[in-house]
Amino acid sequence: MSTPRRIGRFLVFPAFAAGGMASVHLARMSGPLGFSRLCAVKRLHPHLTRDPEVVAMLLDEARLAARISSPHVVPILDLVIDDGELLVAMEHVRGLSLAELRRSESTYPPPVGVTVSIVVQMLRGLHAAHETRGDGGAPLHIVHRDVSPQNVVIDVDGLVRIIDFGVAKAAWRAQSSRTDDLKGKLGYMAPEQLRREPVDRRADVFGGSVVLWELLTGQRLFAAEGSEVLAARLSPSSAAPPSTVRRDVPVALDAIVARGLAASASARFDTADEMARALSALDLEGGSASIAEWVRGAGADRLAEREEQYSRVATWAVSDELSRSADGGVVGVAVGDASDVSDSTATAMMSSRTPQVVRTDRRRALGSVALVASALLAVGVVWSVRATTESASPPVTPAVSANPALAPSASSTDPVVAAPEMAASGSSALVPLPAVALAAAVAAAPSPSPKPRLKPAAANPCSPPWVVDDAGIRTFKLECL
């Protein structure tokens, strides 16, 4: 494996996938005190970092995905601008895309139950995106617009997730598509999207239905390219019922597929959730376990290659030079509203070699954490030693005095234990104290001097202010009147 590159707090390994806008890499996200996590990083191509539209597009994708809360959508972990690089870090899925798995369909075609289970989970992820709201509670009207096998990933445990909201439509997104641009894959676009008409969530229902038809039949629904596919798609759908292509497909599925592929948006399912519930009602789902079994069979070779990569990444020994290169700081960009970063601001941040956001001093932060940890450890040891001493000797009440003469001092006969030296002057890094040495140092430290005992005050002659004679008569003392 080639030598990885340190970008901020990410150790980025060579790309395993690439598109026109960015490359995708395995990476190790590192933090203080040994924190480390394997993740996937989408890295904008260097020649595009000065393009405001492309930068805004990637920023929008991160913001959109960060807003969506669903186990069926890959979450965003971090968004970093550092040294002219733009990285979007996301949770790494230990699995393969549906497009990769379909390459083995001739050998491992998915059973009908597995297909239905995959599509139901996919539709639930889409529905979660469609239902996402902003901070004020207003719907964001997110439409993925690129539902396709390339953007559906399945992990080895059978969990299906949606990725890549790069061309998604949303009410607030900063990057708006040009009217003459078609963004997405033609073979999965709804007719209204091809006509450049306004789209809503039902366009994603259409794309999901194309995926369902192709998984059931093992064929491409719209395989033609360019003007041919456009002409075919703008006419009413003439897709063959899946049961006529594959004999083990129940006829009950035909009606659901046909409704999802309706040329008119009004004739389709109103929501992805409605279609998912219609599929679940057929009681054909095989569950995550059956999906996992199919994934491990159909993707055996590719999974073996990926596992070898994971092993190398996980065990990579990071050199001191790479570790020190991360100490300079990382520029973090909040994944918030699109108004937070304009196109010009984002591009300026990308092209500038000097970060425009306040840097985080990792060495200072690590030193502070280590100092607090050492202090807490020292307090614990002190109490432990004192508890042992008090159990074997009479209690002594310590006192703190402002008088230097009463301050504790070390006896000339007391043993001296040298604590490890601190780091060089000017550095806030703290050398960790070994537990044994720390305990010995605390035990050897002088105990606080006992509080000086005060002499009893003289008796008050006026307490009580009277005397009682032999007859029992009380007479008050004159000096006390």
Image (cartoon, rainbow, N blue to C red):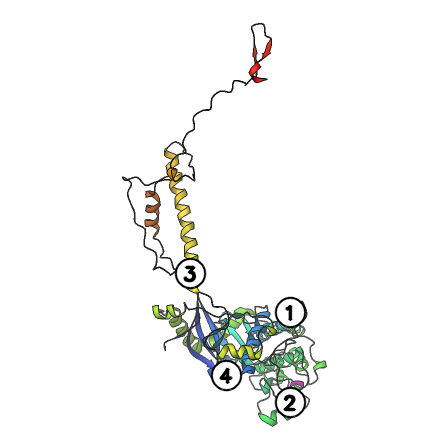
The residue under label 1 is 134
Amino acid type shown at disc 1: Gly
Q: Is residue 49 left or right of residue 221?
A: left
Q: Secondary structure at mark 2?
A: helix
Q: Secondary structure at mark 3?
A: helix
**In front: mark 2 or mark 3?**
3
Q: Residue at x 34, y 56 (%)?
A: 422
Name the mark on residue 343: none
**In front: mark 1 or mark 4?**
4
Looking at the image, how many numbered discs can be counted on the residues?
4
**In front: mark 3 or mark 1?**
3
**Callout 1 touching callout 4 (CB < 8 Å):** no
Residue 172 sits in quarter: bottom right
Q: Is residue 210 visible?
A: yes
Q: CA distance from mark 2 to mark 1?
A: 34 Å
Residue 69 sits in quarter: bottom right
Q: Which residues are magenta?
A: 192-197
The residue under label 2 is 233
Q: Residue at x 37, y 33 (%)?
A: 393
Q: Nearer the viewer, residue 234 or 257?
A: 234
The residue under label 4 is 48
Amino acid type shown at disc 3: Leu
